[in-house]
Image (cartoon, rainbow, N blue to C red):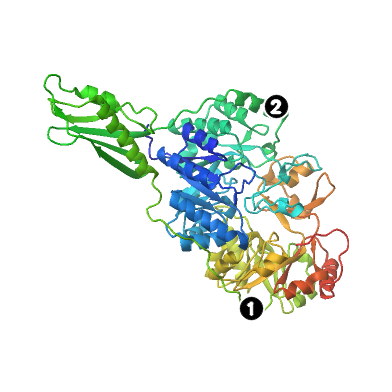
Amino acid sequence: MKRNKELPELLAPAGSFECVNAAVAAGADAVYFGMKSFSARSYAQNFSFKEATDAIKYCKSTGVKIYLTINTQLFDSDMEQALEMCRILYNTGVDAYIITDLGLIREVRRELPDAVLHASTQMSPQNIYSAEVLSKLGFSRMVVPRECSKQELKELCEKSKLEIEAFIHGANCVCHSGQCLMSAVIGPRSGNKGNCAQPCRMPYRGATEYPLSLKDNCLAPRMKDLIDMGVSSLKIEGRMKSPDYVYGVTKIYRKLLDERRDASESEVKELADLFSRSGFTTGYFDNKVDSDMLGIRTREDKIASSESSEQAESYPKKRIYMDMACTMKKGMPITLSGTVEIGNQIISATVTGREPEVALTYPMNPDLVKKQLIRLGNSSFETDPDKVEIDMDGDVMMPVMLINQLRRDLCEEMEKKITAGNKKRVDTASVQELENHVKKCRIKTAYFDNVRSIPSEAFDYFDKIFVPLEDYCKVEPSGKALLGVCMPNVVMEGEENEVLKELDKAVGKGCSEMLVTNLWQIDAAEKRNMHMTADLKMNCMNSYACKKYSELGFENIILSVETGLPKAADMKSEVDLSVVVYGRIPVMTLEKCAIRDILGMKGSPDRCEYCKTHGYVPLTDSKNMTFKLRGNPKTHRNTIFNSVPIWTADIYNRINKLGLEGHYIFTDESVEQVKKVINAYIHYSLPEGQFKRI
């Protein structure tokens, strides 16, 4: 069946080869999968190289695109294997890479310049400026946050140079993608490495027992809006789900797209029966971000899914529509041609047989030829009998068995052309050998979440002090330290102008230092001649990312806390590297205010004034560990800080000997407590109370 080209791509998940079959059978236009390494869903079955090759060939034979997901952050030791994986699957014919790590992006662009790159939502692409930067990095598409409202998504589709891919169904992480360190910090399982322990699904004390657990996203009732606004790709989440789930969800969305309509109540219920957490939410899309979005997986949900699974259908084989034309003339070999359209590509194939015989008694009937040609059986193709062209003399004949063989030859030749890998094959792909530069200077930095807690001693101890952008003009610097702004790590489409106006105020007051928390801010810093320091939220974990940040103009990089001291010490960099040596790590950024749910606050969030007059709100888990939440009065976003601070004063001299400098994070400390911390690090003091090492 030929589909309207104006419809967005329907992109389905696959955690196994069985899921690939299910997605293709249900009508997916494209499928995304991960390998057994470097996948953000490492607990999915995932693919070996043989399985990946088979999946790529199968999808191509049915006209379905296939994308490789490599959306984890990488260490230096991972880079060679990850790049080799990209090379092998490039040659096999993978259509695009959904990618996150800036170091791997650099190496893929260098070794595989023709590869198609899609920016994973783990890169936190949030606005039109994100699209500008990603375009310069070589991306053709960006996967936007689940937190996008209808208006934000519409504006991105209208303004972006890149294709826009949006999530339409599946799990909602309460934290902005790429900004979550909670699982890694409280235990050994890293979300950035694909092993998230889902602390957001756990109970916490407060008026609401599960203040971080969101219902699954379901935009089936909003399909007409999505089609009309011009989203390029509609993405279903669920690489850890069963084939029955993939088939059932994809089939419903396929029908909604083809019929250009919103889902009925019965169809939403059918989706919920496959999997839900207390039902679904459209809260982000509808810009109704409140407690109605909260939900957990109930016993009733599990029973419904179990019954739905028992009723699963077998998966029908998907076919590609092929136009066919046969020429059977005296004195020349019979020819059979076929043409298929896959995406924007027209593929044609022609096969020939022997010359037809002159019929002495019963010439061959064109209807009989057509009858044999349309018997496409178990092939990957289908055709319209009324459109099969037969051009033949009236007095020729040919054995039916030879016509059947010609049809089989055409199908085989067409499959070869469709499943062929990339035309430009790559024989080798190896990471670039980087030089190890000797650091010429050390930059000791600090971030103060509360500007009222900055003592005068801080300006003598630190080289650079960063404060929230909106608080810059409240601080009067004294001493040697440079005062800079820390940019908000989440700025959704439509919010940039206000942020940039605030930045211009700071620059007007003499600010020349920026702590960059998202790639889109690079352009803002360059236009204002500001010096850039990469924040830990940029998730830099390898030397190749350091190299790319250097090429982008950064002077200092604060490494991810997931890197650890040994790996950090071995990293090669042209710019100074810092590690977090003190403070509570920001482990989550929430679009939905959890503070209101913890405190049991009612009424419209837009009228809430709590965060203007109150400080940090405790979030206590079942192990009596208490995290600190801070709300933003303007956006109502929350930042969660870890339950205990990092402490390294007693080993600080060792850290310096490794060629690394320190970055300090101050949250709810008083002025006197900040002074005490500075003194402790000057004298290499032992820790007091609970703490964490990097």
Q: Looking at the image, is 331 positioned above or below residue 667?
A: above
Residue 511 visible in the displayed image? no
- Name the disc covering residue 83, or none: none
Q: Amino acid at mark 2?
A: Glu
Q: Amino acid at mark 1?
A: Val
Residue at 62 percent across and 45 percent down: it is 41
Describe the element under mark 2 as helix, strand or loop. helix
Q: Nearer the viewer, mark 2 or mark 1?
A: 1
* Quadrant assignment for the C terminus: bottom right
How many numbered markers are drawn? 2
Relative image position of residue 580 (x, y in whole percent): 73, 65
Residue annotated with mark 1:
438
Q: Is residue 212 left or right of residue 126?
A: right
Pick whichever, 237 or 239, lies toward us.
239
- Which residue is more in the foreground, 573 or 412? 412
- Residue 71, how many percent across, how many down? 58, 52
Looking at the picture, how far across and down is residue 276, in whole percent? 64, 33
In the displayed structure, 288 sits above or below 692; it is: above
Which residue is rendered at x = 12% and y = 32% of the image?
330
Residue at the spot 12% in from the left edge and 25% down from the top edge = 395
Q: Farthest residue to the top: give it.
A: 361
Q: Residue at x 61, y 67 (%)?
A: 505
The crowd level at tag 1 (other Cα within 10 Å; few <14, some 14-19, many 20+) is: few
Residue 300's disc number: 2
Q: Write down the quadrant of residue 331 in the picture.
A: top left
Question: Mark 2: few, some, or many residues within 10 Å (few <14, many ≥20)?
Answer: few
Residue situated in front as seen by the camera: 459 or 494: 459
